[in-house]
Image (spheres, helix red, strand yellow):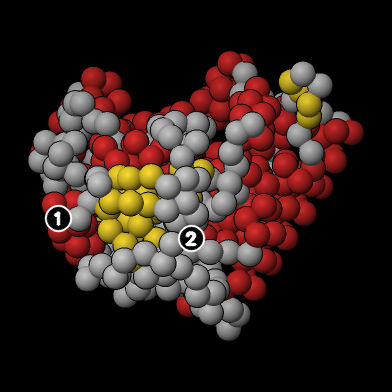
Amino acid sequence: MTAGPAFDEVDLSTMAFWSTTAAERERSFAVLRRERPVSWHRPLENPLLPDAGGGGYWAVVRHADVVAVSKDPQTFCSGRGVMYGDAPPELLEASQSFLAMDAPRHAKLRRLVASAFTPRRVATIDAQIRAQARAVVDELVERGDCDAVEHVSRRLPMWTISEMMGVAPEDGDAFAAMANRLVAAGDPEIAGDSDPLTVVVECLMGLTRMALELAAARRAHAADDLMSALVAAEIDGDRLTDAEIGAFFVLLAVAGNDTTRNTISHSLVALAAHPDQRRLLREEFDVRIDRAVEEMVRWATPVMTFRRTATRDVELHGVPIAEGDKVVLLYSSANRDEHAFVAPERFDIDRDPNPHVGFGGGGPHFCLGFFLARTQLRSIFDELLHRVPDLEVGEPEYVPGSFIHGVKRLPCRVGDHL
């Protein structure tokens, strides 16, 4: 691994940087996109491993480069880690499933998981989501003014994942709590008196134990849920191991929860700040919702970063990257790149084309659950816009961190409803 040049003067590696607002971070990204689209940075301040040290990393901030790196897994691999900051290998193996794999293992595992999503299964999930969205808004109307994160944004995706996987209703709260703490372990409010690594380990062990107990129960008695499909999935004689099922369960608990949850929250804020867009979407919902969903994902960019590792010496924008160097993809920057989007600072529900990288930059690691996110966003905003047309939101409180673009709290006033 190369020592690299001097670290860039725009410092992306502090918790202070990742505790600022998206607008403040965008000012730094804009400088890098314009002047140094590939830049060298010191190791990320990492609450999980504060004494890890290690070498620096290359920050890739332009849309075209994020896509190019994503579509070249032979040169920029995932098997040496995909998280911005380092973590113990055993934790990565237990939590990231095929996210942190390369071919051929990645392709095999992804095919096995994808085979469980039959057309009938997808149709069942779609119907479940529509019913859940109605119920979430029923409860919101009955409750009145509240925290929209707690009672809308967080409620729908975790309910979807729980019911989809077959988690028993009495275990739903524990499942949600572990998933939420796992992602936000670096937040002192979440970690409490425990160090973040301890929180992560406890949550991983709890979620894995839940997955293996559920898998064993479904092998004995199949049900109409995704876990039953996963334990039965088989391609060319290969089946998912317990470890693979456990890791996918953890991945789904996190990726299927936090990404959609935070997109809902950011979109509530965006629609409140752009009443003309909200009015257009409500008046012509069926015509505009598909493009609006893509703009919501671009605007929120719920996953802000992922990492790759160079497998050989290569150049990007004339900058030499050595074999073994870490390469961090800044999705937040790519989704505001003026080279890829007209007026990227504008929230535009009719944006077309909209080549956002909110589901990844393409290539073999494109988000497997994108259809879930789209269905959830379409369903919840259909209910909210038509049944709670006067919903108002206050100032959001954000979760500090460099991975998930998290909203911790979002006060809302329900007002008139239908």
What percent of the width, then of the height, locates residue 76? 46, 43
State left or right for residue 28 relative to residue 124.
Answer: left
Q: Between residue 289 and residue 391, name the one nearer to us.
A: 289
Q: Residues within 10 Å of mark 1 (few under 14, many from 20)?
A: few
Read off the residue under disc 2.
1
User: Which three-letter amino acid code belongs to the residue tagged 2?
Assistant: Met
Q: Is residue 283 left or right of residue 249?
A: left
Where residue 2 sits in the image (x, y, percent)? 43, 62
Label 2, residues with CA under 10 Å away: few <14, some 14-19, many ≥20: few
Lower sequence index among marks 2 and 1: 2
Element under disc 1: helix
Which residue is under mark 1? 35
Image position of 240 (left or right of 372) = right
Q: Quadrant of residue 134?
A: top left
Q: Nearer the viewer, residue 69 or 282?
A: 69
Q: Going 38% across and 40% down the picture, which residue do you hit?
A: 69
Rendered residue at 43%/35% (across/down): 72
